Image (cartoon, rainbow, N blue to C red):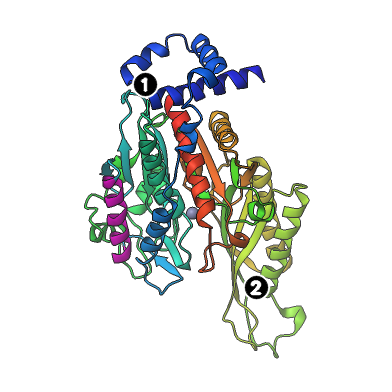
């Protein structure tokens, strides 16, 4: 407890010092931070009347931020209130330009990598230290809303503005990242930009032979958007340790914060996602002519497996294990024809990787057993992805918690059951996430909504957390 308190005092003092003293004198203040902290803290109400102002001066220009969210939503291929913004489309290119402009207006130095991840950096006074980064995505699946991802990009730029207006000077540089293609819409790969940043050689190879539904290759699509070197994406990889911290602001996409009237969610872990594609094949036949003992019905095999998925998930004994058969297709799909082929796509997640992997193994065993019993062929069982979960870093959780306390905002620690670019940034950097409430937990549909004051609260917590992390 004492340790927690004194370390948070060091951070508090650091923030204050940066606000009100020159950088050159600051390094001296740090010579003996412990002594200095205790002196300053015990004396601050008398000697430092401006101290409390430093937090109230974290004022978010909420109206302008809301205006930007509305403007960005107009770069859409479907009519408002829906938003459709697909990777490397014309609207995506315009939206990217909009973001780069805002970064420049905020005085950030802007750079893009070969896949179109966009970085805006505010140099700290010790620019050789690994920076603290924050960001999210702005692509939107068809007919979705205007807050998913966007709050974490526009909100991050506003958090930088907030800190600049308060007079704060970062020690470590602060960097805003707009990730390319968090959504899998166009090429079937989610978190494309952050997976590459985290050094996925497998993905860089795969993209060399990936095309979209219109048969446009990935590199041609990238070239259309102005990224001419997308044939070899190894240039995008970042080394581990490139950032001292990464923190993402995001709408919760679930109902908990709103239901409990809590302002902020401090994410402690991101559930580990996995997905499976599989096919059963039987002989099919006429629904009237083939008698029941003669059948090997691929549809019934799929139905049996769907129930087995539910059973295996429930057997895990943890509420954190989930499984969904989101796609179940029957071929040929006629009322008077026994299904000769069935295709299933299964999503399963857990915060515990071992437990999640046991579920996958059980699903596989069930598929084999069903195939044998029903005399259908298991023609494909492919694990498309099997990512590990990510745990938030303790230092980032603590920084976000103390930011909430200092800003007098209610908060709760929670798990992110959806995954985000943060899941992959966790492979190269200590990671954390800040959630804000959203209406009924709606997301990925036009009704998605977050109130301006909730967004502003998220930005203030983000700004203060960035400030704290920048000084460590
Ligand atoms: Zn998102």
Callout 1: few (<14), some (14-19), or many (20+) C-alpha neighbours within 10 Å? some
Q: Is residue 311 left or right of residue 75?
A: right
Residue bearing mark 2: 298
Q: Position of residue 77 (x, y in %)?
A: 37, 71
Magenta range is: 89-105
Where residue 202 is drawn, which disc sits there? none
Q: Is residue 133 magenta?
A: no
Callout 2: few (<14), some (14-19), or many (20+) C-alpha neighbours within 10 Å? many
Q: Position of residue 424 (x, y in %)?
A: 47, 42
Seen at 49% across and 37% down, the residue is: 56
User: In the image, is residue 312 above or below residue 41?
Assistant: below
Q: N-terminal of the two: label 2 or label 1?
A: 1
Marks 2/1: CA distance? 73 Å
Seen at 44% across and 60% down, the residue is: 188
Local secondary structure at mark 2: helix
For marks 2 and 1, give the one nearer the viewer: 1
Seen at 55% across and 13% down, the residue is: 38
Q: Main secondary structure of the magenta part?
A: helix
Residue bearing mark 1: 21
């Amino acid at each position: 407890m004492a340790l927690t308190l004194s370390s948070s005092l060091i951070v508090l003092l650091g923030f204050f010092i940066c606000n009100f003293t020159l950088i050159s004198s600051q390094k001296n203040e740090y010579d003996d931070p412990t002594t200095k902290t205790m002196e300053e803290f015990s004396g601050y109400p008398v000697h430092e009347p401006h101290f409390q102002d430093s937090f109230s001066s974290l004022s978010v220009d909420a109206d302008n931020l809301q205006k930007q969210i509305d403007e960005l939503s107009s770069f859409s291929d479907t009519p408002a209130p829906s938003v459709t913004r697909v990777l490397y489309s014309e609207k995506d290119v315009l939206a990217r330009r909009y973001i780069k402009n805002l970064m420049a207006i905020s005085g950030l130095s802007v750079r893009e990598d070969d896949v179109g991840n966009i970085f805006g950096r505010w140099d700290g006074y010790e620019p050789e230290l690994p920076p603290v980064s924050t960001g999210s995505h702005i692509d939107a699946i068809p007919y979705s809303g205007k807050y998913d991802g966007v709050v974490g990009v526009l909100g991050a730029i506003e958090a930088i503005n907030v800190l600049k207006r308060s007079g704060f000077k970062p020690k470590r540089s602060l960097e805003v990242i707009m990730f390319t293609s968090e959504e899998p819409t166009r090429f079937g790969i989610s978190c494309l930009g952050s997976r590459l940043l985290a050094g996925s050689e497998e993905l860089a190879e795969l993209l060399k032979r990936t095309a979209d539904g219109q048969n446009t290759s990935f590199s041609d699509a990238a070239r259309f958007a102005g990224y001419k070197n997308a044939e070899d994406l190894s240039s995008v990889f970042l080394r581990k340790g490139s950032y001292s911290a990464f923190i993402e602001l995001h709408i919760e996409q679930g109902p908990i914060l709103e239901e409990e009237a809590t302002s902020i969610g401090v994410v402690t872990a991101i559930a580990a996602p996995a997905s499976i594609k599989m096919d059963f094949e039987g002989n099919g036949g006429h629904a009237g002519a083939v008698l029941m003992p003669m059948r090997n019905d691929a549809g019934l095999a799929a139905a049996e497996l769907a129930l087995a998925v539910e059973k295996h998930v429930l057997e895990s004994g943890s509420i954190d294990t989930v499984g969904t058969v989101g796609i179940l297709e029957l071929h040929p799909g006629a009322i008077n024809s026994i299904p000769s082929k069935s295709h299933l796509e299964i999503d399963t997640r857990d915060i515990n990787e071992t437990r999640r992997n046991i579920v996958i193994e059980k699903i596989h065993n069930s598929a084999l057993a069903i195939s044998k019993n029903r005399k259908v062929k298991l023609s494909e069982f492919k694990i498309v992805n099997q990512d590990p979960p990510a745990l938030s870093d303790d230092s980032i959780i603590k920084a976000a918690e103390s930011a909430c306390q200092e800003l007098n905002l209610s908060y709760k620690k929670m798990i992110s059951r959806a995954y985000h670019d943060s899941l992959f940034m966790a492979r190269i950097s200590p990671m954390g996430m800040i959630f804000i409430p959203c209406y009924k937990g709606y997301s990925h549909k036009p009704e998605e909504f977050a109130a301006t004051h909730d967004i502003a609260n998220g930005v203030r917590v983000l700004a203060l957390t960035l400030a704290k992390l920048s000084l460590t």
